[in-house]
Image: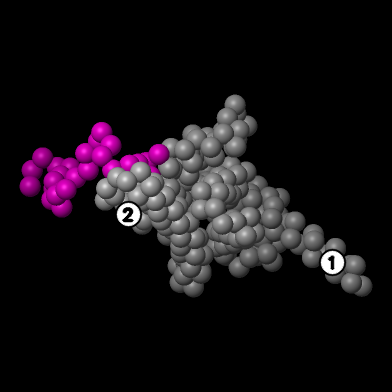
Amino acid sequence: MAAKLSTDSSRYDQKLELILRTSARIFAEKSYHSTSMRDISRETGVSLAGLYHYCKSKEELLFLIQDQCFGRVLERLEQRIKGIEDPFQKLRIFIDNHLSFFAANMAEMKVLSHEAESLAGEMHEHVSTRKRQYTRMARKILSEVQCFETDSAQRASRRNDHRERTTRRVDLTIATYALFGMMNWIYNWYDPRGKLPVSQLVDNITQLFLAGFLSKDGESFALATSARTENVNVWRTN
């Protein structure tokens, strides 16, 4: 009896995964709002009645795609950085975890990027909580990297009897969302089956990000000192 229940549960999970993967692909191709349950039924070969056995609505399908993606990427990250002290190693693991996961789930990445506001109510709040948790983890790792680099620079200055220079730190909120912007944009151009393996993608994005995030004070480019911003209107007339 227990074996039969386990088999039934496994079949249920496999069918649900097929439905979610297919739904993600269709949402990515057509957009969530342009997709009907009939489209999903036709592509999966599951009857409409069968679909409603696995989910109550198209919105619940979108919710499950987003919730499972964030859940799995968070779980993998927590397992991989457990016991890691080096903040730079943590950051590389974070970038590798994100890119390797979504390189294998490109349709899901596009859905997460484009359909972030398509959920409402409790479903939206649940996914938003997951996203905030993930964002906080990224920000914490970047804070650790920044503090480690600053402390190292100060120790080196004292050791060489140089006056400590005040460095202008990159704002952590900006850095966090800039990093996600770099990583999440790959669905527009990256081909996981192409010549560039994920490992090289991870190395290059890590290097590009750190070169800007930890740039030294006094680099050749100038940072703005004024809070004034030009008010640019897309229209010629006011």
Decide whether residue 233 is among the magenta residues.
Answer: yes
| Relative image position of residue 85 (x, y in whole percent) | 56, 57
Residue that lies at the very extreme toward the left in this rendered image:
238
Residue 40 visible from this viewpoint: no
Q: Position of residue 52 (x, y in %)?
A: 65, 65
In this orientation, does residue 145 appear? yes
Which class describes the residues within 10 Å of circle 2: few (<14), some (14-19), or many (20+)?
Answer: few
Q: Residue furthest top?
A: 195
Which colour style is shown? one colour
45 is higher (above) or lower (below) than 188: below
Q: Position of residue 89 (x, y in %)?
A: 55, 49
For the residue labelled by badge 1, is the local secondary structure a helix, a strand or a loop? helix
Q: Which quadrant would residue 11 be assigned to in this image?
A: bottom right
Q: Nearer the viewer, mark 2 or mark 1?
A: 2
Which residue is drawn at the image coordinates 49% and 73% (left, top)?
A: 122
For the residue marked with disc 2, what is the amino acid?
Asp
For the image, the number of numbered tags is 2
195 vs 125: above or below: above
In the picture of the structure, the residue carrying the numbered disc 2 is 171
Label 1 neighbourhood size at 10 Å, few (<14), some (14-19), many (20+)?
few
Q: Is residue 230 magenta?
A: yes
Amino acid type, label 1 = Ser
In the rendered structure, which segment of residues is drawn in magenta?
211-238
Kindly identify which residue carries mark 1.
6
Give left or right: position of 112 versus 56.
Answer: left
